[in-house]
Image (cartoon, rainbow, N blue to C red):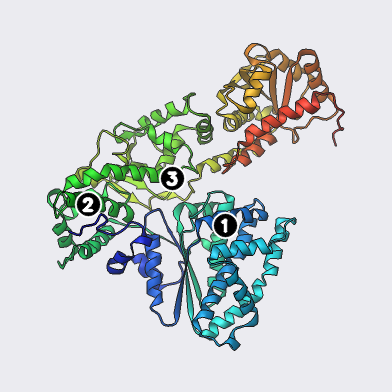
């Protein structure tokens, strides 16, 4: 047995070149890419072999005498630096993508021009003057493509204009159209094909509109070059979660991207062939057939394909998982002086692998599903197989626990129900559902969600690769159970990105326009305000619920318990003694004098001296008139503050919460309102009349 830890090769392609040279397994996906050009986007989850595929494709195309393969891997530090520069294109995805598209397209064309110059396939006379000028300047901008783009934008972008002006000016100053036309002629004259392999775009990636716009611009630039410049073909290797974000945000997805991607997927037979190809090289075996290769390297319960299945069920059916498991198992066997693997070797390393897989799940989805960790923790030390009813009961306790930290409370409010939490856990492959037709547990690992509604008696299963990390009552599968687990990419599901958080916020935002103003929509508006308050203020405000209005029992107001932990709500507690905060809900325009008197009657004891009234007005500002007069009278006579909120304020806050990772915009809004009332409305300052 070879005396090294990673006997089957390194799990990172950039450090696995020796094994890739000797034992690369040609999958159907690999053959598709070298035999056709209609799938330039290669999509896969972590560990599915994207970088290994990129490396092998480069090696394949470099063999051609008239083909030049160019590998482009942006550096993390340079991509992070680009984020600051791309902010000049504004905060709209379309603007960011348009600016990035121009910059990356220019970069790709000039990377090709540099290689064309270095190949000496054209004489200096054939090298177009415009292309030569840009090429020489491009080479001086830096040593890598990302650093060159960063320097280029620093020099070319004129600050102070609108995003639209900056974008139009950038394309013009780079002479992009003329450059493309001239380079197209030069490539044709050289009779050389250029293959661009663009990998690891997740380096420095943040899943916000700016980050997705940076990647989306690169994708569209590659699609442009493929269709507009004969002789240049670009391939982009994308992480699955980035691709999903692109599908959600990009309005041109169906036109330019849909149908042009290849999703990497591994089945049991492909993984078995991959492992056996590496075993043959690692142990210098000359046996015919993969079955014999596997049996030479294993013993007892690990023999035959059934033994390989026992290993596979502790993974997420990805090359990285399987190789990591077997590498560590062979290392344990080596330390014990054995030449073959036994089941105990696999079990000894499985817990560590299980912990790694769970950490990978959190890393991949924690930004778009911030409550993923506490939701999975609700299933610790239990049975891996439970009913849907039991699963929802576990999450229901979590959703209703007022002791949960504030940041999580907001996310639970966005998810709205334990049932939606279960669907979320299914969408990321943590839970599988038993199919009544086949009696198999079906798992989904690509972020899609089940089309069917779960029933209380439906059986769910935590994926076996997480069992040990979760300290469940079972940690292994018998053969019959293993046969009942299907890891599938294509099941009866509808395509929906896993950004459940943003989708739910958008739904609430859009629902407001459908609620009629007045008595007809009063109950619906109360429910809408309840959800809006829960989402915007959950954490500092807890136990948010509807409470009957004492003056109109058929109407309900929103009340919440103020924790007064910090920030604006601590200010509300300290300055106005509000332990219970009331939001009076008025599905109408304007606030009448009687409604101010009504609020006055509420504000005593735990309700303190401050209350909010939510209306359907378009503007929250107070102008000279009855509303301002009553606000000042209540304050001057009774030291009570009544703050006017509007549904439009909540809509604005909900929009800011979509994908937000910045300081809490809701906290900022309440602080600003308190300052405005203190400094302006309550100070006696003269105000303008409403326009």
Vertical position of residue 38 compared to residue 345: above or below: below
Measure the alpha-carbon separation of dots 3 and 2.
Answer: 27 Å
Residue under circle 2?
331
Secondary structure under the numbered disc 2 in the rendered image: helix
Nearest the viewer among 168 and 87 is 87
Query: How many C-alpha atoms fall within 10 Å of the one at disc 3: few (<14), some, or many (≥20)?
Result: few
Of marks 3 and 1, which one's residue comes earlier in the chain?
1
Residue under circle 1?
214
Where's residue 276, x and y in %? 22, 61
Where's residue 233, x and y in %? 49, 72
Q: In the figure, is residue 561 to the left or right of 678?
A: left
Measure the alpha-carbon separation of dots 3 and 1.
Answer: 21 Å
Residue under circle 3?
363
Q: How many labels does the image show?
A: 3
Nearest the viewer among 667 and 651 is 667
Where's residue 351, x and y in %? 28, 41
Secondary structure under the numbered disc 3 in the rendered image: helix
Where's residue 112, x and y in %? 53, 74
Q: Is residue 250 visible?
A: no
3 or 2: mark nearer the eye: 2
Vertical position of residue 391 compared to residue 435: above or below: above
Q: In the figure, is residue 132 to the left or right of 6?
A: right
């Amino acid at each position: 047995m070879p005396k090294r830890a990673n006997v089957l090769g390194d799990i990172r392609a950039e450090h696995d070149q020796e094994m890739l040279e000797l034992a690369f397994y040609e999958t159907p996906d690999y053959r598709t890419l070298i035999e056709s050009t209609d799938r330039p986007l290669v999509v896969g989850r972590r560990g599915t072999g994207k970088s290994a595929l990129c490396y092998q494709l480069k090696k394949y195309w470099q063999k051609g005498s008239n083909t030049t393969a160019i590998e482009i891997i942006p550096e993390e530090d340079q991509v992070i630096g680009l984020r600051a520069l791309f902010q000049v294109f504004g905060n709209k995805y379309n603007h960011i993508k348009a600016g990035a598209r121009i910059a990356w397209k220019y970069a790709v064309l000039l990377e090709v021009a540099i290689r064309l110059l270095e190949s000496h396939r054209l004489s200096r006379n054939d090298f177009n003057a415009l292309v030569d000028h840009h090429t020489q300047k491009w080479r001086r901008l830096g040593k890598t493509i990302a650093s060159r783009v960063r320097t280029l934008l620093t020099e070319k972008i004129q600050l102070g204009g609108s995003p639209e002006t900056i974008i139009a000016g950038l394309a013009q100053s780079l002479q992009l159209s003329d450059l493309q036309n001239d380079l197209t002629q030069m490539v044709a004259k050289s009779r050389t094909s250029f293959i661009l392999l663009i990998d690891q775009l997740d380096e420095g990636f943040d899943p916000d509109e700016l980050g997705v716009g940076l990647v989306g611009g690169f994708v569209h630039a590659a699609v442009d070059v493929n269709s507009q410049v004969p002789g240049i073909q670009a391939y982009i290797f994308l992480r699955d979660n980035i691709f999903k974000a692109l599908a959600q945000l990009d309005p041109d997805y169906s036109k330019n991207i849909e149908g042009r991607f290849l999703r990497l997927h591994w089945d049991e037979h492909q993984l078995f062939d991959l492992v056996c190809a590496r075993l043959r090289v690692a142990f210098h075996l000359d046996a015919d057939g993969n079955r014999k290769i596997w049996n030479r390297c294993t013993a007892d319960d690990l023999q035959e394909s059934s033994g390989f299945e026992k290993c596979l069920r502790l993974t997420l059916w990805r090359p990285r998982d399987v190789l990591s498991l077997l590498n560590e198992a062979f290392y344990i066997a080596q330390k014990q002086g054995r030449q073959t693997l036994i089941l105990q070797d696999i079990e000894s390393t499985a817990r560590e692998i299980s912990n790694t897989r769970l950490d990978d799940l959190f890393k991949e989805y924690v930004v778009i599903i911030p409550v993923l960790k506490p939701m999975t923790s609700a299933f610790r030390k239990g049975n891996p197989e439970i009913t849907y009813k039991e699963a929802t009961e576990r999450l229901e306790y979590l959703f209703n626990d007022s002791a949960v930290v504030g940041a999580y409370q907001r996310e639970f409010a966005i998810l709205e129900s334990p049932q939606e939490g279960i669907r979320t856990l299914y969408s990321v492959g943590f839970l599988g559902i038993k199919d009544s037709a086949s009696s198999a547990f079906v798992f989904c690992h690509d972020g899609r969600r089940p089309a069917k509604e779960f029933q209380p008696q439906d059986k769910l299963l935590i994926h076996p690769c997480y069992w040990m990390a979760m300290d469940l009552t079972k940690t292994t599968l018998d053969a019959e159970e293993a046969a009942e687990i299907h890891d599938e990419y294509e099941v009866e599901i509808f395509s929906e990105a896993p950004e459940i958080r943003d989708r739910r916020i958008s739904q609430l935002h859009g629902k407001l326009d459908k609620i009629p103003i007045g008595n007809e929509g009063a109950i619906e508006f109360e429910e809408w305000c309840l959800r809006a308050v829960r989402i915007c203020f959950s954490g500092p405000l807890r136990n948010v619920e509807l409470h009957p209005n004492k003056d109109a029992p058929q109407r309900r107001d929103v009340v919440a318990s103020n924790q007064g932990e910090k920030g604006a709500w601590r200010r509300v507690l300290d300055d106005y003694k509000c332990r219970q905060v009331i939001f009076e809900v008025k599905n109408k325009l304007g606030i009448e004098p009687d409604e101010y008197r009504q609020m006055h009657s509420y504000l005593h004891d735990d309700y303190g001296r401050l209350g909010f009234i939510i209306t359907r007005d378009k503007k929250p500002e107070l102008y000279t008139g009855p509303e301002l007069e009553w606000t000042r009278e209540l304050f001057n006579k009774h030291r009570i503050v009544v703050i006017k909120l509007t549904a439009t304020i909540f809509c604005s806050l909900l929009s800011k919460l979509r994908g937000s990772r910045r300081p809490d915009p809701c906290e900022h809004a309440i602080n600003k309102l308190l300052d405005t009332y203190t400094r302006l409305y309550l100070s006696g300052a003269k105000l303008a009349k409403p326009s």
